[in-house]
Structures are given as C-alpha cells and as structure tokens.
Amino acid sequence: MYDLGALNKAEWAALIEREARGPSGALLRAADQARLPYYGHRVFFRGLVEFSNVCRMDCYYCGLRRGNKGVRRYRLSPEEILCCVRAGRERGFHSFVLQGGEDGVYNGGQMVNVVERIKAEFPGAALTLSMGELPPEMYKRLRQAGADRYLLRHETADAAHFARLHPPAQTLDSRKRCLFALKELGFQVGAGFMAGSPGQTFETLAQDMLFLKALQPEMVGIGPFLPQSDTPFAGEPPGSLSLTLTMLALVRLLLPQAMLPATTALGTLVPGGRELGLRAGANVVMPNLTPTERRGDYLLYDGKIGIDSGVDEGLRQIMDSVAVAGFTPDFGRGDHCRLGEPRLNTPRNPA
C-alpha cells in the first residue's frame, strides 16, 4: 500500500493531500513497523547544547534572525560548552548536538578547537553540529577534528518557496551544495523542513520528498512551523498536527533507516506532541543541556516549552514522554543503520 520509491511529484502531492486531513491508521501503523527491523522500539537521546544565538542570516521565520533587534544575544564560551557536555555525560549521554546560529566567531577555527577538545575528553561520544551554511573547507576541518554528524535543514526543495522564506542573498542552490558537500566528506547528514510553513503547498512538499530520496540523508528534522512575534511571519498560522504527523510517517516509509526527531516544536504545538511524533515514526529526542539562564534567549518561535526547566527536570519529562509512548530510551551513540544492515543492539541506558 505504501511503496513510495517510484512515486512522481503528482502522485506524492495527491498522497500527502489525502493523508494530511488526518493521517490514517494504516499509514501510522506502516510507519511504526518500518523502523522495527533497524531500531526496534528504541528512542535515541541526544544532549542538546544551544551554544550561540548570534546569527548573520535573516530568515523570515526565525526568531534569531539578524534583523530581530529584540533578542538578547549570547555566546557560550568553549569552556561553558564543555561543561554542558560533561553534565550530559554524567547523566549517561553518549551523543551530543551543538546547535547555534551562523555565528562568525564559531564559524571559524574556534569550533574546530571545541570539537577537538570534546573528542579528546570523550572519544567514544558521537558529536553532531548544526551551525548553518559554511565553506566546504570549514566543513572539512570540522570533520577532520572529529565531528560525526551535521544538521542543515533544506527547509524546502522548491526554489520559489525557498525565496518566500528567505532574503534574496540566501538560495536553495547554496543550501543544496552544502548538503551534498557534507555527504561527500562522510558526515551523517540531516536535512528537513517545517510542516505548514508560509507558502507551502502539497506540491512543494512533494518536491521535498523527491529531494530527500535523491539526497538519502541519515537524519530528517520535521516539525510544525510555529510563528515568532518579531519576524515577518508573526501573524501566520502554525502548521497543523495532522500534516506534521503525516510527513513524519511518510519520511519514515521513504527512508526507513533515517533518524527522525520528535521535536520540541511538536511538543510546543500540542500537549503530548512528542509522544504522537514517536508513534508516527520518530525515534530521536534531544533533551536540553543548555544553561537554564540562556534558554529563554534561544527562541526560534514563540511559546517554546522547557525553557524554565533544569537539566534533570527536562530529562525526566522527556523520559516520561518516551515511556508513555511505549518506547525504550537509548543513551548510546545512536548511529544510523546503513542500507541493508538491520541492527538491533541492546539498548544503552543512563550510566
């Protein structure tokens, strides 16, 4: 029923339109079954460090955009980043995500040094970076320093839609070049998009699916669009729960071995959103290790949950969500399974 590999754009659009009214039980069951040969019922925990909200870009949907003068900017020092990682390691994490805006300070050699220090102290840990578009040479240096993964949402594979979401200086061609350069360097690569972003249609979502099929990313980040009050899209409606769950399930079926986060945005959209995302095919959560006093300054969208929670409280809340959804936490590296390599290892729980 859901053999998606050969669908063309029109067929994708029709399927998405039909399911987006409310994903069918058949679709959700198929998505749940698709991951079982590779990951079972495990949910992989990544410790998130939001190291900087400084950004040179001016994306119209993002609360950290350069043009937002209402943001209290911050930048964690290398030692503060290391302290966050150490706090996560003490709680059993073996996988970390360093996420920030396109900060001119950390887009240079300083992040290379941070990666080297983390890998020297925790050589067995997996390290993911999410810091935007960089020159290929910088990606190469970060890879050589020991970074394992890189998250860079493509946001949309339709050029006209990309132009609706970004100023003219930012282009879809540039974003695609970065993603393919990361693949060539051996990173586990993450792409993704917002469900319900302004100007999005079933046809643009169909184009996203065709692009993901071509890219074959190891990770795909999908969450609902949520407006931020200091952006040009402040008055736009949020993306719907049904569309977000539909796209999670369809991506799970298209890329059964992909790592799919149940995002904070989904948990912000509706109570219990993370649990619903897990049941629709997601298998990653990212508890926040950022210092509590900085979390309120890293607001990509309004209403973000968890900004007042301490590390232990936030971790406990997510652990409860995973249990309620009927899944098992895994605090190991959580590497992507290669094509043709089903792998069901014993889950690793906090030490």
Image (tube, grey):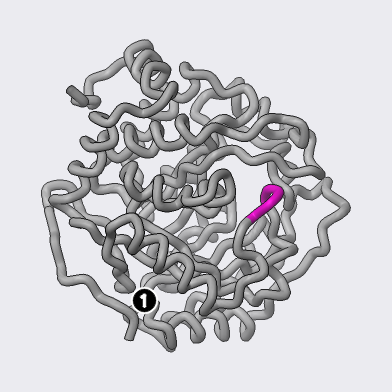
In which quadrant of the rendered view does residue 73 lie?
A: bottom right
Residue 20, percent from left and from top = 43, 24
Query: In the rendered structure, does residue 171 fall within the stretch colored magenta?
Result: no
Which residue lies at the image location 46% right of the left edge and 36% below the top edge?
244
Above/below status of 309 relative to 102: below
Judge whether residue 144 can be spotted in this image. Answer: no
In which quadrant of the rendered view does residue 89 lie?
A: bottom left
Q: Secondary structure at mark 1?
A: loop
For the magenta stretch, what is the residue range?
300-304
Position of residue 227 in the picture relative to residue 112 (left or right): right
- Overall secondary structure of the magenta stretch? loop
Residue 271, percent from left and from top = 53, 50
Q: Label 1, on which residue?
A: 94
Above/below status of 255 relative to 305: above
Residue 293, percent from left and from top = 72, 75
Which residue lies at the image location 17% right of the left edge and 50% below the top edge?
36
In which quadrant of the rendered view does residue 294 lie?
A: bottom right
Which residue lies at the image location 45% right of the left edge and 44% below the top edge?
191
Name the residue nearer the viewer: 307 or 7. 307
**Which quadrant would the N terminus be assigned to in this image?**
top left
Which residue lies at the image location 53% right of the left edge and 19% below the top edge?
201
Name the residue nearer the viewer: 298 or 158. 298
Above/below status of 120 relative to 128: below
